Each structure stands twice: as structure tokens, then as C-alpha cells.
Amino acid sequence: MDIVLSITKIVLASELDEAGLRRFHIATRLGIGRATLYRWLDGIKKAGSVEGYINQYLKAKKGPRAKRKVDGLVKNWIWDIRANNKDCCGQKIQYYLEKDKGIHLAVPTIYKILSEKYALKSKWKKNKPRGPVPKASKPREVLQVDSVDLGEIFAFNGIDIFTKEVDVVLRPSLTAHDGYLFLEIAMRRRFNGWVKMIQTDGGPEFKDEFRLNVLKFTQRHRVARAYKKNEQAYIESFNRSFRKECVGWGKYKVRDLPILAKEVKDYLDYYHTKRAHLGLEMKTPFEKRRLSHI
């Protein structure tokens, strides 16, 4: 980046930060990475003024830059954050590190440190064309519902695609009656008794008794198109997190239901109040709901 342009952006970054604009939006507006923005603002704070930091910035540009090393204590913090937050991703570790320790590191640096202890495998796949998915501009507009086979126990899961609030109802069978009971329990317990649209797949657990009663809780029941998994993207994403972070991939017996129910309850408490969500700009679902005034 040109020196003059860099200095201009440093000054603008300071002014926008003082004006109270969120740092994510400052970085986007100036066309810089968030790591660069945080480095500039931290430098300004330590230097005591924009002018002082610019002088330091210009001096640093004249000589060779010393290679920065990450302190061993910080590495341990990064490893602990990952271990204590369900093997979370680098972006979330970056968020927690800054929130709890006041330290900002670039995501690639965090992954480099993680690779010193863990065998990391990229979960990102090549971009594939995606069809339309239900949209929501406020809470309780779209609820996606699905079921998860846990052996002799079945989890009926629902997610508000705007706030990412979820509920899980465990049942010993997979029938339309069990689907109806999910509505009776989850809609009243988690989703204020009403949503604008409920979307399910075409499974038998979402027919018969479920269909006869679903319009008590919504004005529209939409069945996702077969073989269009992206239409259920939000609930399928939660199902993966639910398995990875809570129930695993094993098979449960009906006798495990009381113990499993407690584990699920504890997980949902964590999910709603402590787990930062990338799709919510690192907010929790309950924080998102409060900000939405519902």
C-alpha cells in the first residue's frame, strides 16, 4: 500500500473509531483487513496520538521489520480456548482471545499456532452453486425443523434462521405424533408460540398428525424440495454442530434418554448464552434476540 494512502487511512480509521463506528465496518469501508485496523488503533493508543503513531509508522517503514514472535503463554491460551469451546474455529478463537485477554492476532497466525499442537484438516469445500433458501429479516419469520437419528432415540431440532435460537426435543420414536409433540413443546417453550413459516423436509414424521396441527403455530408450512439440501441449510448446519459438540455419532438406547436429555439441556444453555456465532457477528443467539427487541 502507498505510504501516503496508508497515512490517510490511518487518520480516517482513528476518526471513524472515535465516532463510534463498529470496527468491522471501518475495515470494510477502508478496504483493509481487521488485523491491520486493530494494529493501527492499538498503535495510536500506545503512542498517545495519531501523529505520534504516524511518526513511528514512518520510521518503521525505513528499516527492516523484525519478525514478530508469539509468546508461549499466548499459545497456551489459544490451545485452551479451542479445547474449552468444542474445537472452535480460528475466527472464534480470535474473538475470545481479544474479548477475554485483550490480545488481537490474525486468523492465519492462530491457525499456524493451532497446527503446532493439532493435526488440522480444512473443512472448507469448493464453492458450489446454491439455490434459493428461505429468508428472514427479523425473529420468528422462518423456523427450519429436522430430525436426527440417534439410534433408539430421535432428536427433533428446530432453528429460527434469523436469531439462530434452537430447541431440541428428544423422542423414543420417529412418528408424526412425535413431530406434533415437538411443535407443542418447542413452539411454546422457545419460539413464542408462533412463527410466520415452518419448513420441514418430506419425512413421514412431518405428515399426518404433524400437518393437521402445524397451522396452530404458523400461517404456512413449507416442505423443502427433495434433493435440495441447501434449502434446509440452517438446520443442517446446526445438526452438524449438535453432533460434533454434544451427542456425537454413537447410537443411544431408550434407557439413555434421561442422561442424554440433561446433556442436551446443558448444551443448549451453552449454545444460547456463551457460544459465539460467525453468522451473528460473534454474538450469541440470545444477544441477537435482545437486540431485535423480541
Image (cartoon, helix red, strand yellow):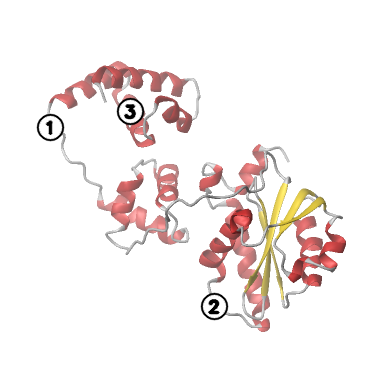
Answer whether labels 2 and 3 touch (C-beta < 8 Å): no
The residue to which callout 2 is attached is 250
N-terminal label among 3 and 1: 3
The residue to which callout 1 is attached is 64
The reply, left or right, for residue 125 in relation to residue 111 is right
Residue at left offset 71%, top offset 48%: 142
**Quarter of the rendering occupied by the N terminus:** top left
**Quarter of the rendering occupied by the C terminus:** top right
Residue 20: x %, y % from top left: 50, 24
Residue 263: quarter of image? bottom right
Q: How crowded is mark 3: few (under 14 residues within 10 Å), some or many (20 or more)?
A: many
Type of amino acid under label 3: Trp
Q: Closest to the observer: 246 or 176?
A: 176
Q: How crowded is mark 1: few (under 14 residues within 10 Å), some or many (20 or more)?
A: few
Whether residue 191 is visible: no
Tell me the distance, in whole angstroms, between the alpha carbons under discs 2 and 1: 55 Å
N-terminal label among 2 and 1: 1
Residue 238: x %, y % from top left: 58, 58
Residue 287: quarter of image? top right
